[in-house]
Image: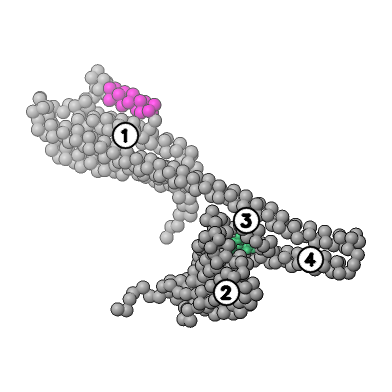
Amino acid sequence: MVVDIHVAREPSPAEAELLSRLDWFIRLRWLAVSGLLITIGVVGFIFPAVFPLLPMLVIAAIIAGYNLAFWLYARRLRLPRSEDTYRRRYREFIHLQIVLDLVALTVLLHLAGGRENPFAFYYVFYVIIVSILLPQRSAFVYAGLVTALFGGLVFLEHIGLLPHTDLAPVTGVASTRNSLYVLGEIGAFASTVFLVVYMASGIARRLHERTQVYLDTVRSLEERTQELSEANARLRQADKARADFVLVVTHELRAPIAAIQSFLRVILEGYAPNPAKQRELLERADARATEMLDLIANLLELSRLTAGEQGELKLLDMGEVLLNIVDVMRVMAEHKGLMFSVEVDPHLPPVRANESRLKEVWTNLISNAIKYTPSGGIVVVSAYQTPYYVVGSVRDTGIGIAPEDQARLFTPFFRTEGAKSLTKEGTGLGLSIVKQIVESYGGRIWVESRPGQGSKFSFALPRAHPPATSSTG
Ligand code: ADP
């Protein structure tokens, strides 16, 4: 088996097009040689003495010989080469083929009646193909060459420098009366016309296809450019958001440290002489330090979630997770003078989540409800199921949230003016963390609220085993 190790590079569409054109020429020439041999056989049989059959056979053999050489050379041209070298060789090769064909045609015409031979139409066929395939200048050169060859032949036969093969024995005196000659003339004309259509329309179709491919490429490039510029804009936006985030974080971390430092300075510089005052300042510093550690813990949690950490996933009963933390929450709520109630569907289907993260969701939402509901209010926590989700919700009768603030609640560090004036406690990170957790399990979170009337935060997690869609009837 012969393995062509050179065919490492796929030919480009342009190369493939050139190659297939070469193949066409060569294949067509085999057809022409066969046609020629059949014609020589037929005319030799019908008019044995009229045509110089041997020279005609020699010409047929020469055409077959150079076509064989072309066929072998075309196979070599297929080896990978740079496109420019390839184009140059292709041009030279095409020129050589056409010139040889035209010379062979002229010699054949000369042997078979010169001007009287209707196959002179074949010159036109060549001129048309050359006009399509080659640059205009080359086409004009060929028009000149064809004129020179045919004109020269007619002229040289006219002045007697070349012997003229008289077709009178074939055609009789009036060639238009001779049906065999007329048939030949029609045949020559028809084959020229059909060959021209076959080759010209074939080339036109291929060129059209290549243009289409080119246009498609341009279109998809335009789409890619658009996508890239959109992605670029998104990246710039993300970059800006990150820079803003770092700015806010730095600011948030700076405030408690500055406070701690000022408490310590008061003591160090002797402005708090009695131990009771010193202790009070140290306790305040300690409280700010705790606050800062909380903030740092929240930031760490948020960045872990952003990095896609889901924690160990288990099949969990959302109601059970709630009941684990609800006692602490109840104490906090009742301590603040709130009515606290819990409504849990006892047959909740499991969800796939991480237990401590799910606890974090519940704790954040319930402690917010407690924090932002003045005493005397109500907090109701519930867990229920829908066909595809298990839903947790925390409702309160607290300060509520203005509609324009509701969309911003889940962005880091956002706190409403109402919340800020009610309590200084709070980082504005809790809801961002909750949203990231819920969404990392394929769930979603939403809020319904009216300022002054209360809020209801709900989150839905997909059931670990969604019910089969077909009904049992
Ligand atoms: P934090 O409570 O630490 O400020 P969160 O991210 O938990 O941060 O909440 C962001 C903001 O959303 C709060 O500052 C508050 O303005 C608002 N918010 C959250 N829960 C409630 C609620 N139950 N009632 C009213 N406002 C709320």
The residue that disc 1 covers is 129
Q: Amino acid at mark 1?
A: Ile
Q: Is residue 427 left or right of residue 215?
A: right
Q: Which residue is mark 2?
A: 339
Q: Position of residue 202 (x, y in %)?
A: 30, 41
| Mark 2 or 4, nearer chain start | 4
Question: What residue did someone put label 3 on?
Answer: 417
Q: Where in the image, quadrant-wise, is ligand 1 located? A: bottom right
The label on residue 140 is none
Q: Nearer the viewer, residue 370 or 436?
A: 370
Is residue 369 found left or right of 11 in the rendered image? right
- For the residues bearing labels 1 and 2, Cβ distance under 8 angstroms: no
Under mark 4, the amino acid is Arg
Q: Amino acid under label 2? A: Met
Task: Say which label, 2 or 3, has the lower sequence index.
Answer: 2
- Quadrant location of the C terminus? bottom left
Q: Secondary structure at mark 1?
A: helix
Q: Residue at x 42, y 60 (%)?
A: 1
The furthest residue to the bottom: 346
Tell me the crowding category of disc 1: few under 14, some 14 to 19, or many 20 or more residues within 10 angstroms, Cα based: some
| Residues under numbered marks 2 and 4 in contact, where contact means CB atoms less than 8 Å apart | no
Q: Quadrant of residue 13?
A: top left
Q: Which residues are magenta?
A: 136-152
Left or right, residue 354 beside residue 15:
right
Quote the CA–CA distance across marks 4 and 1. 96 Å
What's the mark number on residue 284? 4
Between 293 and 395, which is closer to the camera in this rendering?
Answer: 395
